[in-house]
Amino acid sequence: MNAASLIQALSDRFPAAVTASHSFRGDATAIVSGNSLLEVARSLKDDTAFQMSFLMDLTAVDFSAFGTRPSRGFFSSSGVAVRPSSEIPTPDPWPGPPADARFAVVYHFFSLPLKHRLRIEVLLQGDDPEVDSVTSLWAGADWLEREVWDMFGIRFRGHPNLKRILMYDEFVGHPLRKDYPVNRRQPLIGPVN
């Protein structure tokens, strides 16, 4: 199944859940509503048309500061913006960040038997975002969801052990939030005897 037909099959199966989609260079991306995530994920794993047996990655993006300053990437020595590759047909092929969401939780799936991939994004708003956990479907999501919780502060409902995985327990805040102060001092914690 190619990217376009994969998106079409998912949109046909879940017309109310898939709010937007796009494809670029063979990568299929579907934006799915948060309240439909578990139903869509279960179908992606169990349905013979999808067979997404492998959750390759799960991460998040904080869009709160997006577009407030120029990008630092792809500049020539004279400081003029250049296209990174002649293969990219337009200077900006990405549709851009969501207009009303602060965070996106991003899932990368791969079907081992069918050899196709799919990216699912769930958009979240507010300062205390929350989405359902997919650990009941892919056990490997356990540590990935813990990392997203630790770094971004996004809670995963139904996670069996949602606690810090990279920072120490006494760390205050979530370092990859765009509102986290860079010069903030944390409590120093010594070794436990």
Image (cartoon, helix red, strand yellow):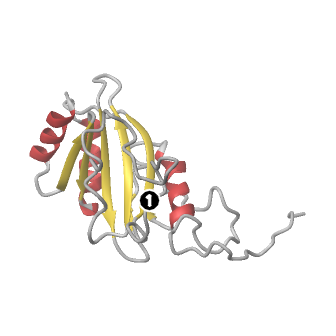
Between 30 and 164, the one lying in front of the other is 30
Q: Name the residue under label 1.
A: 71
Task: Tell me where residue 150 appears, x and y as whole percent.
Answer: 57, 62
Quadrant, the C terminus: bottom right
In percent of width and height, residue 13 lies at: 12, 45
What percent of the width, then of the height, locates residue 121?
Answer: 31, 53
Of the residues shown, which amino acid type is indicated by label 1?
A: Ser
* Count of number-bearing discs: 1
Quadrant (top left, top right, bottom left, bottom right) of the N terminus = top left
Residue 54's place in the image compared with 120, above or below, is above
Secondary structure type for disc 1: loop
190 relative to 14 in the view: left or right: right
Please state if 155 lies on the left or on the right of 109 as rendered: right
User: Who's the residue at 14% across and 50% down the image?
Assistant: 14
| Quadrant of res 184 | bottom right
One can see residue 173 in this view: yes
The residue sitting at the top extreme is 113
